[in-house]
Image (cartoon, rainbow, N blue to C red):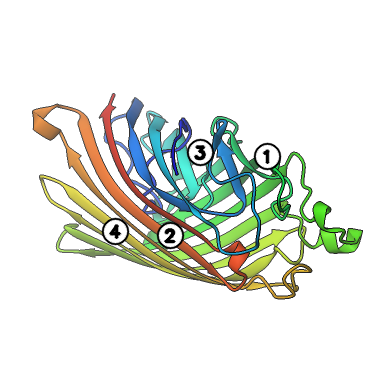
Amino acid sequence: MKKTLLALGISAFTASTLAMQPLPDEAGFSAFVGAGAAGGVVESNFLAEIVGIDLSNDKIYNYDSPNNTTIIIPNFKLELSYLFSNKKTEVTLNNAVESSLDFTSNMKLGLRHNFDNVGNIEVAGLLGNDLVGLKVWEDPYLQGEARKATDYKTSGGMITWDKMFGSDLELIVKTLKVDLDDEQSGQSLGLSSAQRDLLDRQGNLNRAELGYQFVINSGEYVVRPSVAYLDRDLDGDAMAQDGFELGVAMVYSNSSYSWANKAVYQRLDGDKDNPIFLDKNDADVYMFSSEVRIPEPMGWEKWVARVGVVYAQNDASINFNKSKVAMLSANLGRRF
């Protein structure tokens, strides 16, 4: 099955490899606007649609692992910034993908300041994702009938502390609030109210990440290992998880192009047994992304071309909860 999606708020799927980019050399306004496309395969039993286009079938007849849907997505990348005359304080607005596994993304509005020996600190709000129009199934467990879709909204905030006390340590603390317009998980199954409460997908997604940048050969290579604590503090205890993440990112740069790669492993442990499957929602999550960035392609001044791939897999202990995304993306943009 092949679908075509329009997702204005979704930028390139390759994950950012560095917590903060260097401040611009000149004070004032700067911008980057890019557009392109991404295509690949999505597998999920929970995702319903983006801007009215299906991501999975509205009918299911069993609780097996999800089927795959082939998609093509126009994508859009936006970065706006203003650097004050002191060249230490910057305001930024950009769209950012939160998770390539579930298509969540937010507009990020940040205020950043260079505190010299203390480091760079940014406080940012993660605004709503209404432009993306992401929907999930009200009751994903309904069998034999058309399931109804409901809005899936995220918002929150984050703090990033880069170059901590003059070192190459980076700390990122983030929280996202998840809201569904109509959460009806398990309504079709005759479960008790207490059992249905265990399936509630609303709540908070929290993470605290610590990374360290190794700069090699005068910046030709940058390698950043990281470790993170994850707390998916969802209202439904059968959906809630906590665990850890191990990651490593590498960026190679020369005068012609840069190549960024990132690999991530997550181990998540479920809180309580799912009342349908009588098992906890444990999961091993694997993610890999790679992107090549080419400045001034074909001699076009201020233009940047990007080509990337991403693969993400949630190998959940409950087959119904498994998910997968494999995408190839291309984007062309210009700096102003």
Pair 2/3: label in front? 2
What is the spatial separation of the Cα atoms under label 1 and label 4, in whole angstroms?
35 Å
Amino acid type, label 3? Gly
Dot placed on the residue nearer the N-terminal end, 2 or 1? 1
Quarter where residue 280 is shown:
bottom right
Q: Residues within 10 Å of mark 3 (few under 14, many from 20)?
A: many
| Residue 156 higher or lower than 215, as above or below | above
Image location (x, y in percent) of residue 323 = 52, 59
Q: Which mark is residue 261?
A: 4
Dot placed on the residue nearer the N-terminal end, 1 or 4? 1
- Asked whether the beta carbons under mark 2 and mark 3 sit within 8 Å of each other, the answer is no
* Residue at horizontal 55 percent and vertical 31 percent from the top: 51
* Residue at horizontal 65 percent and vertical 40 percent from the top: 153
Dot placed on the residue nearer the N-terminal end, 3 or 4? 3
Amino acid type, label 1? Ala
What is the spatial separation of the Cα atoms under label 3 and label 4, in whole angstroms?
25 Å
- Residue tagged 3: 110
What is the spatial separation of the Cα atoms under label 2 and label 1, in whole angstroms?
24 Å
Task: For mark 1, give the secondary structure.
Answer: strand
Pair 2/1: label in front? 1
- Asked whether the beta carbons under mark 4 and mark 2 sit within 8 Å of each other, the answer is no
Q: Quadrant of the N terminus?
A: top left
Task: For mark 4, give the secondary structure.
Answer: strand
Q: Residues within 10 Å of mark 1 (few under 14, many from 20)?
A: many
Pair 1/4: label in front? 1
Left or right position of 235 against 190: left
Image location (x, y in percent) of residue 301 = 15, 27
Task: For mark 2, give the secondary structure.
Answer: strand
- Residue tagged 1: 149
- Asked whether the beta carbons under mark 3 and mark 4 sit within 8 Å of each other, the answer is no
Pair 3/4: label in front? 4
Dot placed on the residue nearer the N-terminal end, 3 or 1? 3
